[in-house]
Image: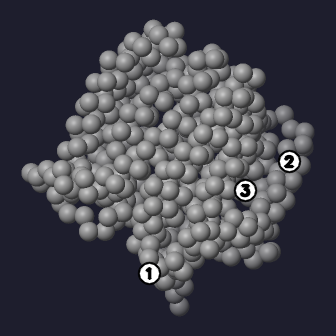
Amino acid sequence: MTRHLKAKTLHGMSWSFAERIGTLGVQFLISIVLARLLMPAQFGLIAMLALFMAVAQSFLDSGFGSALIQKQDATRVDESSIFYFNIVVGVIAAGLLCLAAPAIAAFYKRPILTPLTRVLSLNLVINSFGLIQTSLMTKRVDFKTQMKITMLSAFLAGLAGIVMAYRGFGVWSLVAQSLGANIGRTALLWVYNSWRPVRAFSFKSLRAMFGFGSKMLAAGLLDTVYNNAYYLVIGKVFSPTDLGYFLRARTVQQLPGDTLSFTVGRVTFPVYAAVQDDKVRLKRGVKQTLTTLTMLNFPLMIGLALTARALVSFVYSDKWLPCVPYLQLMCFTGILNPMQSANLNVLRAQGRSDLYFWTGVLKKVLSFVALGITFRWGIIQILYGQIVSASISYYINSYYTAKFLKYTIWEQVRDVLPVLGIALAMGVGVYAVGLIPVHSQALRLAMQIVAGAALYTALCLAFKVPSFRLVLDMVGPRLMRMVGVNGRTHP
């Protein structure tokens, strides 16, 4: 990377990471209170609707957000056309969900899902007014403003949900939290963003971006169906309580795991797109991104798997302990997620949405085959199938990175292997500390976290891991500014 590109990437990634961590951190704290006030089955009811809501949300964006980021010479007419199009699609999608609500309730044999679906469909209309602002901020790599917006809206919505749960509204407190977060975020996007639509609409603009956007929409739909199909199957075959445990495990795993995947995807896509014609610079950027991500993600996933029981017991209470084995298996899949994202963004940045789509088709077919084989034996077996399909998916994702940038899967594995070795050594230490007999789960968890962090830091310093120094350079100055230190030594 050149100095400018490196600085832009690190700046964007640090703020995007801060926004994602801050938002999920607030949501995590809110979820702790809600999990103690509500029952697993109530969370399971909301999860039953996840697939339908997510598919509708995918149509709402229609891939034009990604097309707008990829297009370097977009005009105000282009932006305004997408804005008006999003609103129309949002209203139509919400209307279709309202009509489909009784059928969804009949499918699960849960009558309460009819009103839940209709109220939650309002999120689509609300979100349609903020999609263009989010895309434009992402294109400018402006994640600092997005951090303020998402954290504030998540906090206020979470408080509303807690108050309703405390007053006995049950599952409706989760609905209120969802609506409140989207209303607050959309309103703040208009307050903090000076962009306003012009009175112009052009089908020509939409058609020009449809080639890229339509394939991104199709790929996004595949991802959405795949990511939420497990909720559909588990909700249909098993009980809402079982689905609630599955959802809790996935939520805990996603806090660190998907944060990194989301951050790298959102930051590297516009940065890679800016240098899409310089393959040498792009390869250096992908390699640096990959090694930095794994340096963070490997110890997080290994540590989370080893501290899962103590974490769930202390944070959520013992009533959630059945989700522990689900969480541990999900961590194995989570190890690969940021690596998958780094490779996929090479295709997006190159404008090859066709390949992005067809590789997605192949991976999802494999995943659905695994789900179709394993669901009859139980949730544990479903998760083993996920691990196998994720491993195959990583190979598929890396194929075109090797083709376009000459950065093969074996080079990638060689680059991340030293960090994996250090993370596994840390895991041995964390496991050993967990065997120390203590009566408090909170004390055991604290001991494991401190020991793991200290051991991993010491090993990274001892072996002079380059990506570790890069993260220190990225995070250190910001932490110093947060505590009022300017980072310079004065005479």
Asked if the residue at tag 2 contacts the one at tag 1, i.e. Cβ–Cβ closer than 8 Å, the answer is: no
Which is more toward the observer, 309 or 95?
95
Up-down relation of residue 175 to residue 386 (above or below): above
Q: Label for residue 431?
A: 2
Left-right relation of 26 to 63: right
What residue do we see at 22% from left, 48% from top? 83
The picture quadrant where one finds residue 395 is: bottom right
Q: Which residue is mark 1?
A: 4
The residues bearing labels 3 and 1 have C-alpha atoms spaced at a distance of: 30 Å
Q: Residue 292, position in %: x, y?
A: 63, 67
What residue do we see at 71% from left, 71% from top? 411
Q: Nearer the viewer, mark 2 or mark 3?
A: 3
Left-right relation of 214 to 463: left
Up-down relation of residue 469 to residue 117 (above or below): below
Q: Label for residue 409?
A: none
Up-down relation of residue 245 to residue 351 (above or below): above
From this viewpoint, which residue is outermost toward the bottom?
491
Dot 1: few (<14), some (14–19), or many (≥20) neighbours within 10 Å? few
- Residue 63 appears in the figure: no
Q: Nearer the viewer, mark 3 or mark 1?
A: 1
The residues bearing labels 1 and 2 have C-alpha atoms spaced at a distance of: 42 Å
Three-letter code, disc 2? Tyr
Mark 2 or mark 1, which is nearer the start of the sequence?
1
The residues bearing labels 2 and 3 have C-alpha atoms spaced at a distance of: 13 Å
Dot 2: few (<14), some (14–19), or many (≥20) neighbours within 10 Å? some
Three-letter code, disc 3? Pro
Q: Which residue is mark 3?
A: 299
Mark 3 or mark 2, which is nearer the start of the sequence?
3
What residue do we see at 79% from left, 49% from top? 448
Q: Secondary structure at mark 3?
A: helix
